[in-house]
C-alpha cells in the first residue's frame, strides 16, 4: 500500500514533459550542364548536338518521411513521374504528393527555357519528421528522360550542429529513362513502351556520355526547435479545490478520458468513474465522502495520467 501511495505522490509532482521538433530552412539550386561534346569536349554530356528547343520542365518535388515513395531506380514510374518525364506536366505528380500521407509538402520550382542555367527553390521549411526530399525535372525535348533525386535525407545525425541538420552540400546529377516511352534521341511523341519498363540510368548510354548533367545544391540557412501544439492532459482543470460537495472537471481540449478515480491517503480507491464519451465539462458529486485529503487521478484512453491533491472540507 505504501508503494502505491508513493507512486501517486510521484505522479502528482512529476512535471509534464513535451518534446520539441526541429525545423530547418534550405535553398535548393539546380544547375544544368547539359551541353554537347562538340561545344564542350571536356564537360559536354551529349554525344550529339542539342536541339534548338532544348529546355527543362519545372523542377518539382516533395518532402516526405519514407524512402522510395515517389520514385526508385529500377522501379516502375508512377503516373506523376511518367507525366513529368514525357511532357513536363506536373499536375499529376502534385496530386500524388498531396494525397499521400507520407508527404508533408509539394515543392514547386520554375522551368528553364535553355539547356544550361539554374532553377532555384528558396526558403523551403523542412520538418524533422519529414526530412527526405525527392525532386524531378524533364530533359526536354526527349521521349521520357529526366533528372531526379530520390529521398535525399537532410538530417545529419549530429544533433550538436545545426540542430541535427546537414550543412550546405552539393550532389551530382545524371540522366534517367522513365521506361514509359520508346525513343533514343531528342524527340517528343514516341510510342509508349509496352509493357512499361522501369526507371534506369542513361549515364554513358546514347546520346549521353558518363559526364554529369548538372548539380543540385542544398544551402542550409537556419533551423529552430519548434514545440508543436500537443493535446495535453495538463490542460484539464479541477475546481473548486478545496471543495465541500462537488467538483467540476473542465476538459477544454476535449481529450478522451477513460477513468476518473479518487483515492484516500492510504491509497484505497473510494470513488471510480468510467468515461464512455468525450465530455468537455462535467460535475462529480463528493457528498458521500468524508472530509479530508484525497488524490484525484485522471486517465486518458491513450494512458496519460494526471494526479492532483483534492481537499474536501
Image: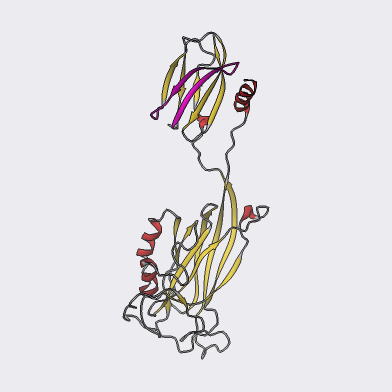
The residue that appears at 46% across and 24% down in the rendered structure is: 250
Q: Quadrant of the N terminus?
A: top right
Left/right of residue 116 with respect to residue 13 in the rendered view? left
> Is residue 274 shown above or below 206?
above
Q: How many marks?
A: 0
> Is residue 47 shown above or below 189?
below
Q: Main secondary structure of the magenta part?
A: strand
Magenta residues span: 256-278
Q: Position of residue 11 (x, y in %)?
A: 60, 27
Using the rendered view, name the quadrant where residue 6 is placed.
top right
Q: Position of residue 116 (x, y in %)?
A: 49, 78
Left/right of residue 143 with respect to residue 207 in the rendered view? left
Q: Position of residue 7 (x, y in %)?
A: 62, 26
Q: Position of residue 88 (x, y in %)?
A: 38, 72
Foreground of the two, 132 or 140: 132
The residue that appears at 55% across and 18% down in the rendered structure is: 263
Foreground of the two, 211 or 108: 211
Q: Quadrant of the C terminus?
A: top right
| Residue 58 magenta | no
Left/right of residue 188 with respect to residue 72 in the rendered view? left
The residue that appears at 44% across and 71% down in the rendered structure is: 137
Amino acid at each position: 500500500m505504501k508503494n502505491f501511495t508513493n507512486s501517486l505522490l510521484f505522479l502528482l509532482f512529476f512535471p509534464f514533459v513535451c518534446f520539441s521538433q526541429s525545423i530547418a530552412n534550405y535553398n535548393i539550386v539546380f544547375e544544368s550542364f547539359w551541353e554537347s561534346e562538340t561545344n564542350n569536349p571536356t564537360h559536354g554530356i551529349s554525344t550529339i548536338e542539342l536541339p534548338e528547343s532544348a529546355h527543362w520542365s519545372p523542377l518539382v518535388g516533395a518532402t516526405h518521411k519514407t524512402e522510395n515513395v515517389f520514385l526508385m531506380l529500377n522501379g516502375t514510374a508512377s503516373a506523376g513521374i511518367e507525366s513529368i518525364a514525357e511532357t513536363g506536366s506536373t499536375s499529376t505528380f502534385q496530386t500524388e504528393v498531396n494525397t499521400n500521407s507520407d508527404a508533408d509538402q509539394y515543392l514547386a520550382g520554375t522551368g528553364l527555357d535553355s539547356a544550361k542555367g539554374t532553377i532555384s527553390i528558396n526558403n523551403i521549411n523542412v520538418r524533422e519528421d519529414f526530412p527526405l526530399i525527392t525532386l524531378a525535372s524533364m530533359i526536354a525535348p526527349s521521349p521520357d528522360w529526366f533528372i531526379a533525386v530520390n529521398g535525399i535525407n537532410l538530417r545529419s545525425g549530429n544533433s550538436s550542429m545545426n540542430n541535427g541538420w546537414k550543412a550546405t552540400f552539393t550532389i551530382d546529377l545524371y540522366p534517367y529513362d522513365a521506361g514509359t516511352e520508346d525513343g533514343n534521341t531528342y524527340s517528343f511523341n514516341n510510342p509508349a513502351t509496352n509493357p512499361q519498363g522501369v526507371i534506369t540510368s542513361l549515364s554513358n548510354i546514347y546520346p549521353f556520355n558518363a559526364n554529369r548533367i548538372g548539380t543540385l545544391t542544398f544551402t542550409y540557412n537556419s533551423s529552430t526547435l519548434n514545440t508543436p501544439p500537443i493535446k495535453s492532459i495538463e490542460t484539464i482543470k479541477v475546481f473548486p479545490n478545496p471543495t465541500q460537495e462537488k467538483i467540476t472537471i473542465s476538459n477544454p481540449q476535449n481529450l478522451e478520458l477513460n477513468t476518473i478515480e479518487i483515492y484516500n491517503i492510504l491509497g484505497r480507491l473510494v470513488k471510480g468513474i468510467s468515461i464512455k464519451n468525450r465530455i468537455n465539462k462535467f460535475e462529480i458529486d463528493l457528498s458521500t465522502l468524508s472530509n479530508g485529503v484525497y488524490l484525484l487521478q485522471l486517465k486518458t484512453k491513450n494512458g496519460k495520467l494526471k494526479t492532483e491533491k483534492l481537499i474536501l472540507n
